[in-house]
Amino acid sequence: MDIARHWRGHPARYRLQGERNRNTGEVRVPPHPLALGETPDTWEPLKLSGRGEIYSFSVLRQVPEGYELFAPYPIALVRLEEGALITAQLTDCAEADLEIGMPVEMVTRQLVDTGADGVLVYGYKFRPVVQ
Amino acid sequence: MNKTSANAYIIGAGATQVGEHFVRSLADLSSEAVRNAFAQVPQLDARHVGMVYVANALGEMMASQGQLGPYLAAAAGLVGVPALRIEAAGASSGVALHQAVQAVQAGACAVAVVIGAEKITDRLDAPLEAGLALAADAEAEGIHGVTLTGQWALLMRRYMHEHGYSMDAFAPFPVNAHANAAKNAQALYRFAISADKYRKANPIASPLNMLDCSTVADGAAAVIVASEAIARELPGPRIRVAGTSVATDTPTLGARRDPLDLVAARTSAQAALSQAQLSLQDVQVLELCDPHGIAAVLALESMGFYERGTAPREAADGAISPTGRTPLATAGGYKARGDVAGASGIYQVVELVRQLTGKAGPTQVAGARVALAQVLGGVGVTAATTLLVGE
Amino acid sequence: MKPSRPVGLIGYGVYVPRYRIAAKEIARIWTDGHGPVPVEAKSVPGPDEDTVTMSIEAARNALARAGIRAEQLGAVWIGSESHPYSVKPSGTIVSEALGTSPWISSGDWEFACKAGSEALTAGMAMVGSGMADYVMAIGADTAQSRPGDALEYTASAGAAALLVGPADQALATIDATVSFVTDTPDFFRRAERPYPSHGNRFTGEPAYFRTIQSAAKRLLDDLGRTPSDFTYAVFHQPNAKFPQAVAKRLGFSDAQIAPGLLSPQIGNTYSGAALSGLCATLDVAKPGDTIFVTSYGSGAGSDAYALTVTEALLERRERAPLAAAYLARSVFIDYAVYAKWVGKLVMG
């Protein structure tokens, strides 16, 4: 059921808990293992705003196991306000609504249902900004 | 690479038809490929094989089989030979060939067999998409339902945005691939398509449509890598492996400085060219990871064959046809020969050996002597480049 | 009832999914389009939405309005009859998504359509007793209904989050509350059953009307006030007719309930219904306005509240989307897509 695997990712998945490099200012999410030469102090936790814009997008019609109910669904590379570029689904939108550069905001949604006897996996998606 | 190291040669190369081999197993396909390769060198005693490398990306997921090294070695009767499986997603074959060449060059063995084998059609559909998506970062990308095709689609839309192209600009790639595959008896799709047909195809992962997406299918191919001493005892033209190189990039697309720059493709190509003491201008025929036009475009531009933003225009002007400056997919490429995932790199070598020995028939590139093959694992996470020179 | 320390709402947030199905479209499937329908349309959760995800968004809106950090919350409670897990709290998922401290009380409430107001009353007690400064009380549902049943026209999806805090920080003080409960099984769902059962017309007079009227009258009596003393009123809204009827019986006017009457457009959001009506009313209220709210949950019970809007509302209101913004982004789907998304297709 991959319970532990999903549980480990909660802070990043649920609320875009990322990290910022104290030396370079680089921001990334989800957090990443330490590289050679880095110490636990190299990166500090940073909660991201969830605001960003579409860098690119695609609507998938052939999808992996477990994602059939959502299909067709849009995926995107989103450039976050803090600079990080992340991959996520877009939700609450139709393909015709989308364009590169469009502002989007983070919402927490079901990513996948691991089955009637498994956990529901929640995580970030992005959608057109609700005013 | 130490210039004094010995040369390695491809002395045999064979493959099965790419297709939906519902009646055949992974082992059965692999066995045929090895037998086809050995049929080209009847003088070679199979007991000289010192190492078997098996390249396969999806064995566990799609064929429910692990320990593919000994499993597929045994399928061809090579029982008892050291054998191992190499997995680098779509780059598996290129990495395996690189290992085999290094082993022969280092003198660890005189003959090595590299098998690329993939069995897809036992499962297909959603498990296949999930399996191919394993080439991406499962935690940061896979969990979001992202597919490998979807990642290429993201890059294609961005490329169109940055360089002002419409989807139509990518038509020359599948059109060329199909035109060439129509003349290849081992191709999956032996028919031509028109740009108009491409334009009207149904979307798969917009802006990629069905005629700009390869079909993943079953197939196996094998090459025999041998030392110079053995190669020189054989009659006929020799194919020297002039350079092989593997480079990698972060698997997380968003973590790359410029997602449209396939850094690993460039790095591995440059290293292979440098080993071979050749330049891009010397390359006369290419095999690339081209399941979609955008993949070929980014590889051609990242390696430096064309300026950024110009490859679709060059392709439209005929640059990728067998008579063009960079003939591509002369056997149909991933799109029309069929996409055999981790086996692709060996199929590429099989085609380039045909080209370098003048046996490529209607898609022969005149006077081809230097060929470049490159496979990518995922969206350029692993890149393996092989340079072959006909002697 | 009043807490010993005065309390109020320091933030509020609503959430309504983007998708709608027209009641006429449901009628097309089951009655060939004939017969009256109880609402115009109902909200439908998207395929990636549930009580947890809707609660998260409503609560984020409430936090944004309140201007406090999630770490300051002392409790996160979610009232719903459609928690995604039968066993495993929605509250902990929502808490982590908000980024609360782990040192909080969190959990789920169930009381049919008044599970959210149960959480609100408990939140008042927790803040009112000084055990916590801030409590997030959420009512949210993706309500189930048997295909073709009367409930299918109304059982919808939505969430409302009310952030309870000290009255001196409130955008609306909660001046008093009463609760009224009896064992009246007008609507229920047995364990392991996918759809609820209900007593048809029994859900009206002896259940909805008697219970709401009892709680509402008692609160008016306790306060020594009359319906005309209130600027606005909100009643649980299982359809368009009931809240209008009960308002009239109690002596409230159509104008008083108009801003909080969402059911004609989005159906019955169950635990979210009365609280969403309150949020929509706060979206238009002015300082000094008074709001009378009565929830209803089958089984059965009502919680009634009297609120007074403060000056703080004006600067906080625009910090998060208004209910109107969620209502405006409606996208209508047909019954087939609805059936696919809400799990009414046998997928094997």
Image: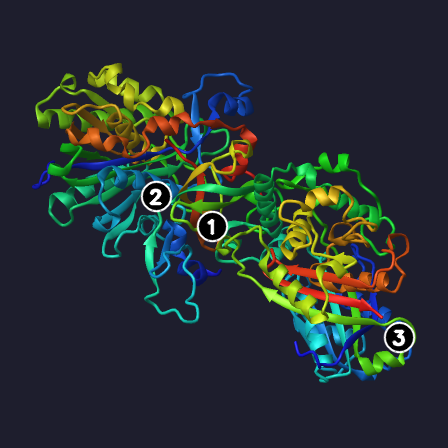
Instruction: Please state which amino acid type lies under the numbered disc 3.
Output: Val
Instruction: Please state which amino acid type lies under the numbered disc 1.
Output: Ile
Q: Nearer the viewer, residue A31 or C195?
A: A31
Q: Decide if residue B278 is on the left or right side of residue A20.
A: right
Return the mark for residue C128.
none
Q: Decide if residue A76 is on the left or right side of residue B223.
A: left
Residue at the disc numbered 1: A86
Asked if residue C291 is positioned above or below residue B80 in the image, the reply reads above
Q: Answer whether labels 3 and 1 touch (C-beta < 8 Å).
A: no
Residue at the disc numbered 2: C56
Residue at the disc numbered 3: B41
Where residue B117 sits, quadrant-wise, is bottom right
Q: Closer to the observer: label 3 or label 2?
A: 3
Q: How is the rendered protein coloured?
A: rainbow
Secondary structure of the residue carrying numbered label 1: strand
Expressed as whole percent of the image width and height from the top left, the position of residue B187 reads 82, 54
Q: Nearer the viewer, residue B134 or B181?
A: B181
Q: Is residue C185 something one can see in this rendering?
A: no
Q: Is residue C215 something one can see in this rendering?
A: yes
Distance, label 3 to label 2, CA atoms, is 68 Å
- Quarter placement of the N terminus of chain B: bottom right
Chain letter belonging to callout 1: A
Expressed as whole percent of the image width and height from the top left, the position of residue B391 reads 85, 70
Q: Nearer the viewer, residue B234 or A120?
A: B234
**In percent of the image, x 78 and y 48: which residue is there?**
B177
